Image (cartoon, helix red, strand yellow):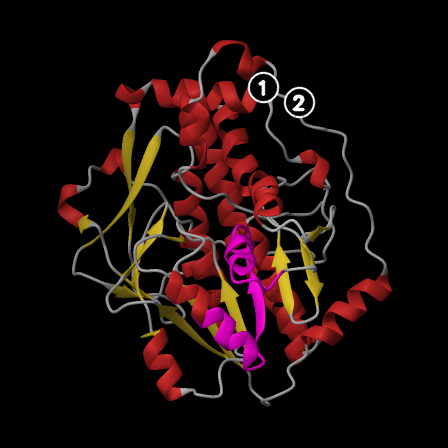
Amino acid sequence: MSRSYVLWGAGAFVALCLAGFGGWVLSLPRSNASAEAPPVPQQEADAMLASLKPDRRGRPLVAVIGINDATETTDYLTPTGILRRADVADVMMLATDPGPVRLYPALVVEPDATIAAFDAAHPEGADYVIVPAMSRDDDPAVIAWLRNQAQKGARIIGICAGAKVVAAADLLDGKRATTHWYYLDEMLERSPTIRYVADRRMVLDGRVATTTGISASMPMMLTLIEAIAGRSRAEAAAHDLGLERWDARHASGAFRLTRSFATTVLANRMAFWNREELGIRLEPGMDEVSLALIADAWSRTYRSNVTTFAAAGAIDSRNGVRIIPGRSDATMPEDFRVSTFAERKPADALDLALDAITARYGARTTDVVAMQLEYTRPGTDK
């Protein structure tokens, strides 16, 4: 039994749902349900670890870059939470401009610094730069900053559709790479010299790494922890997350548009009168990785939006992420509050959230969420 993690950019299926009904939906290919993840040669895994080892500082500096108006929730928070809980690097969440970062599809957080403040404090640059999916692949400030960090020697890690941002900065030209399955054709059309690598959750070429869908940030960060601090530290972090393995195995053929997926999305979007606003209560010290995964999952049902609420304003998470609530505790009806399963590990909490989605909206909606997450639920192996 294993877990695979990934997510999908919010709004990607708005265009799909508006594309028309007719035979187009019925002509969609079915997924390859029998696809299996091929093994990754040990030599390849060892080479990735060797290439990711820090070579400038004893304790690396990691920068997670975002734009203020729309950066993907799990891409931004999960790398931060995993690396900070492992305590193997100094991790800073950055934004292009002052003020909070509005994540999509849910949550609002305060970054640690702007890119300008980071550059002033660290003119030598970061050791690693994590690039989440963003609503704009070609934000001029992000593109210029990524190029500058690469020139200073930082390793660049594009999470999910963050690979498109890395490609827009011309850092993937001629390199091997991957991305979320939905955005692959778009990335290759814009950057035709990229050499796509199938059946890998993460791909490294030189000093640039890319991953499949968003929650592939979990195995990617565990691999980075192993490269920085060794196998035992990575195993401890994996146990803390509730993961049983974190290698690069992936069954790319299992993730694609299907007839069931498209018709469920269309049906859920058309039933706009049944759309619900659900709330997650913010508690000081809560696990930001669980919060990100669960808020992301509930926000991808096409039946619900997720907001946060708290009794007394912004809270600090387990690993120092300042999270700003969307509303007050008193205004969120009890029946519309969803759990973050605070006593469970993040991987288990995600499975429990998917069970809750099934109970509320049905199994087909849960399948839609899992496909967006590029997530294989326990009991299968991809």
Residue at (78% x, 38% y) in the render: 36
Does residue 301 appear to the left or right of 196 in the view shown?
A: left
User: What span is in magenta?
Assistant: 145-172
Which secondary structure lies at badge 1? helix
**Would you place residue 258 above or below residue 95 in this image?**
above
Q: Residue 75's x, y, as percent?
A: 48, 56
The correct choice, above or below, for 78 with respect to 90 in the image is above
Q: Amino acid at mark 2?
A: Arg
Give yes or no for residue 25 being in the magenta stretch. Answer: no
Secondary structure under tag 2 reads loop
Q: Whole-Å distance between the Cαs marked 2 and 1?
A: 6 Å
Q: Is residue 149 magenta?
A: yes
Label for residue 30? 2
Q: Is residue 16 visible?
A: yes
Quadrant occupied by the C terminus: top right
- The amino acid type of the residue labelled 1 equals Arg
Left or right side of 286 for 31: right
Answer with mark 2 or mark 1, whichever residue precedes in sequence: 2
Marks 2 & 1, CB-CB < 8 Å contact:
yes
Vertical position of residue 72 compared to residue 156: above or below: above
Query: Compared to 32, does 79 lie above or below?
Result: below
Q: Residues within 10 Å of mark 1 (few under 14, many from 20)?
A: some
The residue identified by callout 1 is 259
